[in-house]
Image (cartoon, grey):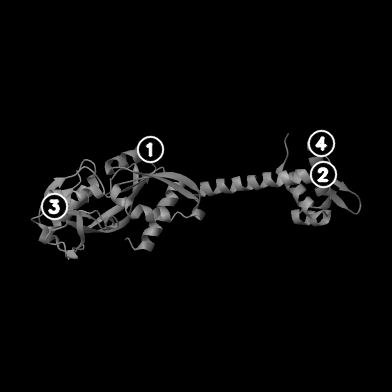
């Protein structure tokens, strides 16, 4: 059965007005055209929907039942159209975002909090090593990546959304445990716990550059376990760690203090990456992330 939606909308308006002149006015058509639409609809469904005479228009019992169902059909259709338009424009859609562990302390939660209910965007987040984040985005297993360096890959769009200050995590009993700030030059004799280059190339590269600008190459011990485990290992290794400031949200027992690094150049970037052929929803999220970055003062 082929029924034009215009016939259904005309029926609903007439059912609400129960007056041909007012219904025709609302529909911006002439009364004869409205009468023709109604007769055509009744013929199509083989049901009389109205009792009408020269003075009155009333819904039949079948018309009352039909009205309730058709209103629901039209509401669902209008909603489907609106959602499709929102998806096409990037105002609605879902995507997958992979992130390296240090981004998960603050940057990612702030970005996802910016996707309020009204935004229509929904994200599914997955923590991976930095190398795996890049690989997952390249291979389309993830749509968005949050990493610590620019991969310089033609397949990927890379947008800087944050420059995050670095802090030094020191264990209990350390000579600087009661300090609040520290210059890197005072740490040239310390042993540093770092994450292997193989799993976090961006972090490793930036940290090397920071030490080079500070004028020394640190003694290092690697730890292949991310997150708070790096900090928990400080006492065992009698070492310190150079980490993004947001790790202060997690304060393991082994850490006595987080010292702000005094050098202005000591920061880690956060970059949002996605494929060049990303969906409208992903591009909308990237735009939203840049707006949030400006609001948060990250850049």
Whether residue 136 is visible, yes or no, is yes
Mark whose residue sits in front, 2 or 4:
2
Q: Which residue is mark 2?
A: 61
Q: To which residue does mark 3 refer?
A: 239
- Work out whether mark 3 precedes mark 1 in sequence or the reverse, and give the earlier one: 1
Please name the residue that numbered disc 1 is placed on. Answer: 141
Q: Residue 282 versus residue 94: which sits nearer the camera?
A: 94
Residue 62: percent from left, percent from top? 80, 42
Q: CA distance from mark 2 to mark 4?
A: 14 Å
Which picture quadrant has residue 186? bottom left
Identify the residue at the far left of this view.
Answer: 189
Distance from the alpha carbon under mark 1 to that under mark 2:
55 Å
* Residue 201 percent location from the top left of the image: 23, 45
Secondary-structure class at tag 1: loop
Picture residue at 72% right of the left edge, 44% below the top: 70
Q: Pinpoint residue 104: horizontal percent, then vertical percent.
A: 33, 51
């Amino acid at each position: 059965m082929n029924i034009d939606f215009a016939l259904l909308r005309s029926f609903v308006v007439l059912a609400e007005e129960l007056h041909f002149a007012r219904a025709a006015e609302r529909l911006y058509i002439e009364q004869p055209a409205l009468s023709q639409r109604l007769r055509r609809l009744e013929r199509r469904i083989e049901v009389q929907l109205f009792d009408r005479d020269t003075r009155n228009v009333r819904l039949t019992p079948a018309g009352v039942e039909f009205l309730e169902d058709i209103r629901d059909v039209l509401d669902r259709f209008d909603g489907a159209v609106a959602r499709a338009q929102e998806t096409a424009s990037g105002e609605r859609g879902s995507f997958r975002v992979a992130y390296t562990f240090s981004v998960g302390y603050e940057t990612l939660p702030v970005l996802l909090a910016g996707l309020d209910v009204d935004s229509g965007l929904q994200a599914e987040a997955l923590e991976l090593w930095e190398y795996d984040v890049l690989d997952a985005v390249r291979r389309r297993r993830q749509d968005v990546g949050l990493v610590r360096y620019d991969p310089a890959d033609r397949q990927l769009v890379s947008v800087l959304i944050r420059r995050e200050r670095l802090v030094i995590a020191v264990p209990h009993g350390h000579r600087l445990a009661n300090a609040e700030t520290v210059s890197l030059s005072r740490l040239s004799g310390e042993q540093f716990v770092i994450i292997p280059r193989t799993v976090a190339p961006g972090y490793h590269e930036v940290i090397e550059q920071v030490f080079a600008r500070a004028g020394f190459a640190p003694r290092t011990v690697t730890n292949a376990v991310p997150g708070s485990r790096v900090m928990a290992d400080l006492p065992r290794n009698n070492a310190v760690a150079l980490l993004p400031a947001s790790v202060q949200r997690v304060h393991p027992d082994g850490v006595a203090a987080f010292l702000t690094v005094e050098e202005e150049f000591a920061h880690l970037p956060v970059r949002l990456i996605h494929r060049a052929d990303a969906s409208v929803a992903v591009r909308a999220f990237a735009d939203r992330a840049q707006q949030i970055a400006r609001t948060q003062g990250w850049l």
